[in-house]
Structure formats: C-alpha cells, structure tokens
Amino acid sequence: MPQLAYREREVAFTADPVATAAHLARNSPGAHLVYEGRGEMAWADGDHLTLSVTATGTTISGPGAVPPSTTAGTPLESLAEALQRIPLRGWRAYGWAVFELGYHLHDLHDLPADPGGEALAHLFVPAREIRLRPGTALLRALDPADLDRLERLIGQGAEQSRHDRLTLDVDAHDGPAYRRAVTTAVAEIGLRRLDKVILSRVVPVPDEIDLPATYLAGRRGNQPARSFLLRLGGWEAAGFSPEIVARIDADGVVLTQPLAGTRALDGRRDLDDARRQELYRDAKEVYEHAISVRLAAEELARVCTPDSVQVDDFMSIKERGSVQHLASQVSGRLTPGRTGWHALAALFPAVTASGIPKAPACDLIRRTESETRGLYSGAVLTADADGTIDAALVLRSVFRRDGRTWLRAGAGVVQQSTPDREFEETCEKLRSVSLFLVPATAVPVRDTARHTLNPA
C-alpha cells in the first residue's frame, strides 16, 4: 500500500519562536501540542492519527486509521508496534505518558494504575506541523492547501505578553499533611525499605488562567531543558521541564539527565552563589544526587552495551527558574535489538520524580499522596519515524483538567531529610510557575522580549 507523505515548505523566519508558538496554540481549536527542545520549537495541530495506550494494548484511531486497530502487549511494547504500522513517511508523534504508566513497567499490579480508567499514554500524529528554527520555519501538512494557511499563521505575529499575574500563596496549602508524609517516608527509609522517595503536594489554582499567556510569561522567567504547551487527551498543561527523562537518537545513543539537590535561586547574586556553595557542602543533597546518578547508570546498563554507559557530566549546577540543581548527564548506546522504547521503559518514571528502588518508592507514593499524579512527573514526548525519542520530565507545570486547575511539586526524601526543609523545597519549585500565572482577564500589551531556543 503506498504511503502518504507530508508536503513541506521552508520559509524565512525571524520572529520570536516562543511567542509565535504561543500564538499558534491560541489559534488551535482542537488537539495541539507545542514542544521546545534541541534547538527547535515545534507546533503540532490536528489529530490525523491518535494512539491511546492502556495496560493491555494500544488503539490506533482517527481519520488516518480506517478502521481503528489495536496492538496487544505491555504498554510501551504495544505502542512501539502500533507506531510501526503508521502508513505515513516521515511522521512524528507528539504526546504524553502519565506517571502511573510506571506501575506497569515495575510490576506493581496491586496498585491502582489507570487513573480514573484513563489512558496511560496518549499520542497523536498531526495533520499539520510547524517547526521553528533559527532563521527558518519548516511547514508540514498532509493537505497541500494547508501550507498557505500555515504560512499566513506565522506571519500574523506573535502572542502578546500580559502583565497581570495571579497571587497564589504556595506556602499556605497542605503544609501539615506534607510534613507528616515526609516523616513517614524517613521512618520507612530508616527501616531499609527504600533509599529515597519523591513526595509531592498539590496547590489548587482557584482562578481561571490564560494558558498560552501563562506559557509565554513562564518561559520568559525560566531556563528549562524543555518546554511544552498542550491540549491533548483530556489534559491541558504548560510546563518548563528542568530535565529530560530520556533522549534517544536515531543512531541508538541514549541520554538521561538526573537533577537532584535543590536550592533557591532569586536573582540576588551573592545569596545565589552562597546557596550554590551550600549545595556542594550539604551531605544530604550530595548523597541524594549521587544515588540518583548511580541508578540512572544501572538502568541504562540494562538496555545498553555495558562498556558504553558513562557519566558525561557529574554534579554541575543547572539554573531552572526559581531554583538551582545539582545536575549530571548519563549516556549509553543501545544493545543491538533494543529500541528507544526499551530505553524509555528502563528509565521511566524518572528516578528524580519517583525514588530508589522505584517499586517500593512508587508504593509509598501511592500510600501517602492524596491523589493520583496523572501527567505530573510523567513525560511529554515526541517520537520520530527514524527512532528518535525525546521525553521531557513533567515538572514545573500548571495543569488543567475537568474544570480544575492546579500546580504540583515534590522533594526528594532520604534518611537525612527534615520535614520543614522538604516542604520549603516544594515552595521554591512551585514559584517557578506560580509567579507567572496570567488571569484570563489580563490586559494584553505588545511583547518586546526575545527568546532563544534551547540548543540541548
């Protein structure tokens, strides 16, 4: 059967890519996803194919799949097989995976793993795409007539900045319960049931927000490894991811970037420098980071040739909005016969959002947190026909679903942790988003800021 192919057009582009992407998202009436990473800002619109992943298989549906079909197997195995069936040259799929996908990857069958009976992952192959790069914009569409419309869209201008902000007290919500959860975790760690767990708390946003304007404002105030803005599969979110879960290149090289160890970053250089030095001297933070890097290397060794696994960068500092982190990078090359989906399965959920070992950490998370995580600490990802996968860890995000809006943040708990300090760390992280929430009734002003795409 002959395969469809995208029609493409490359045009000059000199506008602000972040503000342009926010403008594109505002003008998407249906499913869409903006994803920034590796020196490119991509906008995907219109679900030509939809892939919904559950515990037992992946269903492919949409205008490009008649009739719908299902592949059986474990979640990521069935997804990989479904993607191989896409009758479209040069496709790229965009989507998300919820944290609870990890329950199936680590055989935690006694835990409620499908939040509300929803999909564990949801991806779509778009009918239209724009990929913004320095100096150029690549337009892609299945319908050639859409290319002219896409060119007009990027010529209409960028999202306007908004100066109003909501006031949200991230210190005032759920403090006693969170401190009790940390105390419980420290006790279980003391009994040698696990070494580390990341416990999170939810902060409701009572007012309606303007999501594209919030994304634009938050991206101006953060230095993320990846960023995203989406309406897809029942979720809406804007996020400024501090790290990737995994990046798998077409040649089989896998990267993961564990960040663990946190101090505030507020722009006062003398205080920020002092906190940075404190990070390196704090035995708890250094220990938490080191064991996270160790586990990441062990996980890569399961799917990569043993002599290829290495720590490329160890315990440098990455600045991420309102916080700074100890950061490392671990890499390896896939063993022949392994794919990027094997690598993602080995690394998911990220060690810096779950714990060590992952199975007992996920068990403790489920017992102590007030609700399922869903998209929080899962992944927003892209997957290409050539085998490339790029998966951003969903932290520093604002979520909207079923008429509810909220933030969520966590902290890594080890035996040396104290409830007050871990609560303070969640507040520091929450401010990376809470300071940039734009109300739906904000007054627009012309956006004069310029954004540089993240080259990583």
Image: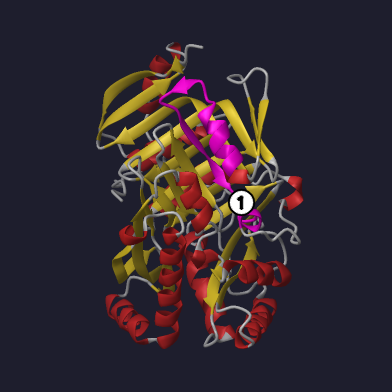
User: 297 and 420: which one is in front?
Assistant: 297
Q: What stretch of residues is rendered in magenta?
A: 77-105
User: 235 and 3: which one is in front?
Assistant: 3
| Residue receiving disc 1 | 98
Q: Is 228 on the left-hand or right-hand side of 270?
A: right
Is 33 rendered above or below residue 276? above
- Please state which amino acid type lies under the numbered disc 1: Val
User: 35 and 430: which one is in front?
Assistant: 35
Asked whether the viewer can see residue 108, the reply is yes
Q: Position of residue 165 (x, y in %)?
A: 51, 56
Is 26 rendered above or below residue 378? above
- The colour scheme of the drawn protein is secondary structure
Seen at 39% across and 50% down, the residue is 335
Seen at 42% across and 55% down, the residue is 244
Q: Is 261 on the left-hand or right-hand side of 408?
A: left
Seen at 46% across and 38% down, the residue is 383
Q: Position of residue 132 (x, y in %)?
A: 33, 34
